[in-house]
Image: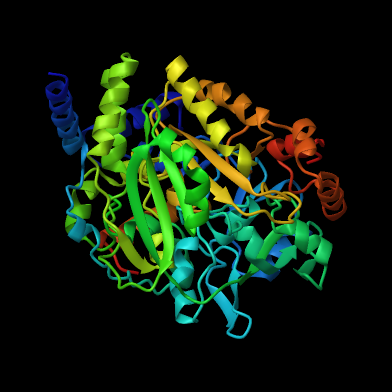
Amino acid sequence: MAVTRRTVLKQLSTAAALGAVTSWSPVSAAARRRRLIPWSNWSGGQRCIPAQRVAPTSEAAIADMLENSRGVVRPVGASHSFSALVPTDGTLVSLAQLTGMIGHNPDTLEAEFWAGTPMSQMGQPLHEAGQALVNMADIDYQTLAGAIATSTHGTGIDYGSYSAYVSGLRLITASGDVLDCDAENNPEIFSAARVSLGALGVITRIRMKNRQPFRVHEQTWVQDTNELLEDVDRLRKENDRFEFIPILHSDVSLCVTLNETNDPNTLPKEGGGDGDKVSLLRNVHKYAGGFPNARASLVNTLAKQMDFPDVIDQSYKVFANVRDQRFNEMEYTVPAEAGPDCLREIMALVRKKNLNSFLPLEYRYIKADDIPLSMFSGRDGCAISVHQSYELDYHNFFAAVEPIFWKYEGRPHWGKLHSLNAAQLSKLYPQWQDFTALREELDPDGRFLNGHLASVFGTRMRN
Amino acid sequence: MKKRIALLLLAGFSGLVACSSETGESAAEAAAPIAALQINDPVLRRTYESSCMNCHGVAGTGAPISGDVQAWAPRLAKGMDTLLDHSIDGFNSMPPMGMCPQCSEDDFVALIELMAGVKGE
C-alpha cells in the first residue's frame, strides 16, 4: 500500500487519540527522547545549550579531548557560580568523575584531592588522615576546583580564602600539556592558577596545606546592626572567626562567632535549612512591604524572638550550613577598614528607596594574600554579599547597590554577579597585566574564553 | 497597645511560617544519620556522590532522602516525565540539573530510580 499524506495524518491522529486515553503515547515518547537538556546554574539565573557535555574519567582523556577538539571548552564544577563563568555553546567539561582524596602527607599536613571533589566530602577523609581544612565557607556545595577558581572564602581576619591554602596543582592546558605546578615547579603559573576562573586550563588535582583537626564553638545571636558596627573592630579581633548577617529593612542582624575550643560536643548542628526563616521574611515582605516603618518594627520584633542553639563539633561539621532557599548573589570585597561605612550606606539606601528584596546581607572578613586575581590580593578584605530570591528579578536591586561598592574600591567575587569589564577590573588588581599576559601565553587561541570571560579580560572571542 | 499589635503580628506571621514548612521535621529527625546508598557502578556512584547526595543524602534539607521509599512514593506518582522536568528545570529548592551538569536524560532516570528505591542496578 502506498503511504500517502492522508495515511500518515490518519495514523498520527490515531496515535494521538490513543495517547489521550492511555498513559502510553508514542508521540510523547518520541518527544521525550528528543528532550533538550540545557545547562543551568544552581539559581537558574544562567543557562546555555552546549554542543556537548563530557565528564572524563581520567586526566589522559581530558588532555586528549583538548588536543584533538576545536572550539570553546569551559570547565564546570557544581554549577554554583552566579556569574556567567560557565555558559558556552561549545564543550562543557565536568569534573564529576574526578573526585576523592589522592593522598596525604602527615609530616607537612598536606593532602591532594581530585579537583572535582565536592567540598562537602573533604572533611571526613581529612579528619581520618589527621588533618582539617584551615577555614571553610558557609556553603559546601562547591567542588574544590570551583572554589579555588573563584577565590571562595569563609570568614576570619586571620584566614585566607581556599585558594590561599593551595600548595600545588596539576593543570592541563589548551594544547593538552600536563603541568605540575607549585612554588618550585612552574611557580608563575602556580601563583596565577590558584585563582584563574577556569581560564588557564583544566585543573585536575589540587594539593591543600592543612592543619590538625580542631573543634569549633558556634554562637549566634540577634543584635542591633549599628551596635555591631560600632563594636566591629573588637569582635573581629577577639573572635577566631566572626561574621554578621544584616536583615534588610530592619535595624537588626544575626551575629555569628566561631571560636576554637576543647569543650565537649553539643548536639550536632541542626539540619532543616533556611526555609522557615526565609518564609518569614518573604511573608513580611509580601504583606508589610508597603509600610516601611511598620515593617522595620515587625522584623526587629520577630528577629529578637529567634533562638539559636550553640554548637560545638569538629570544624567541618560546623562551618557549612544547609542552604535550601535558592537565590542570586552579588558580592564585593572592599578594604577591611571600609567595611562598616560601605555597609551603612547599603542599608540606608535599601531603607530610603524601599528596595524590592528581603533576603539578608552577609558581612565577613578575609586575610590578604599574594594571588594575582584574588579579591584579597595585597589587602585584608571585608566581603559584603547581597542576595535576591531566585523568584524575584535581581537586576534593578543589584544595579542600585553596586555603585556603592565601586565607591569603596570593591572587587567583585568572580563567581557572583557584577557588571564590570576589563576596563574597570584592570585598575583594581596590581598584578592584572601579569595574569592576562600569562593567559594569552597559555591559551593563545582563546579555547577557554566564553563571552563573559572575553569581557572580563578585554579580549575577543576567537572560537 | 503597640505591644499587643506586635504580638498579634508575630503570631500571625509565625502561623504563616508554620504553614509554609513542607517537611515538618523535628530537629532530632533533621539530625538523624543517613545510611549510604549502595551503588556498584563506579561512574553512577561518583555522579550520585558529586550531585544528588548533597541534598538527598543529608537529613533535614527537605529533599526526599535516598532509599526512603515512603517519601518518594508521592513524587513517583507524578510520573517520570514530571520528575525529569523538575530535575532539569529545577523545582522549589531543587536546583536545575540537580548539580549534575553532565547528566543525560538516562542518567537522571537512573538516579531517580535508585534514590526512590524503584530499581537496583
The x and y percentages for residue A133 are: 53, 68
Choose top left, top right, bottom left or bottom right for residue A285.
Answer: top left
Residue at 35% in and 68% down: A313
Q: Nearer the viewer, residue B56 or A248?
A: A248
Q: Nearer the viewer, residue A271 or A30?
A: A271
Q: How is the image coloured?
A: rainbow
Q: Is B49 located above or below residue A228 in the figure?
A: below
Choose top left, top right, bottom left or bottom right for residue A202.
Answer: bottom right
Residue at 26% in and 26% down: A298
The x and y percentages for residue A228 are: 43, 40
Q: Is residue A94 visible?
A: no
The x and y percentages for residue A205 are: 65, 68
Residue at 17% in and 38% down: B18
Which quarter of the image is occupied by the C terminus of chain A? top right
Q: Is A397 located above or below residue A252 in the figure?
A: above
Q: Is residue A126 left or right of residue A181?
A: left
Choose top left, top right, bottom left or bottom right for residue A268.
Answer: bottom left
Q: Is residue A200 visible?
A: yes
User: Disc count in the image?
Assistant: 0
The x and y percentages for residue B12 are: 15, 28
Which quarter of the image is occupied by the N terminus of chain A? top left
Q: Is A5 located above or below residue A291 in the figure?
A: below
Q: Is A102 located above or below residue A358 in the figure?
A: below
Q: Nearer the viewer, residue A374 or A394?
A: A374
Q: Is residue A100 left or right of residue A351?
A: right
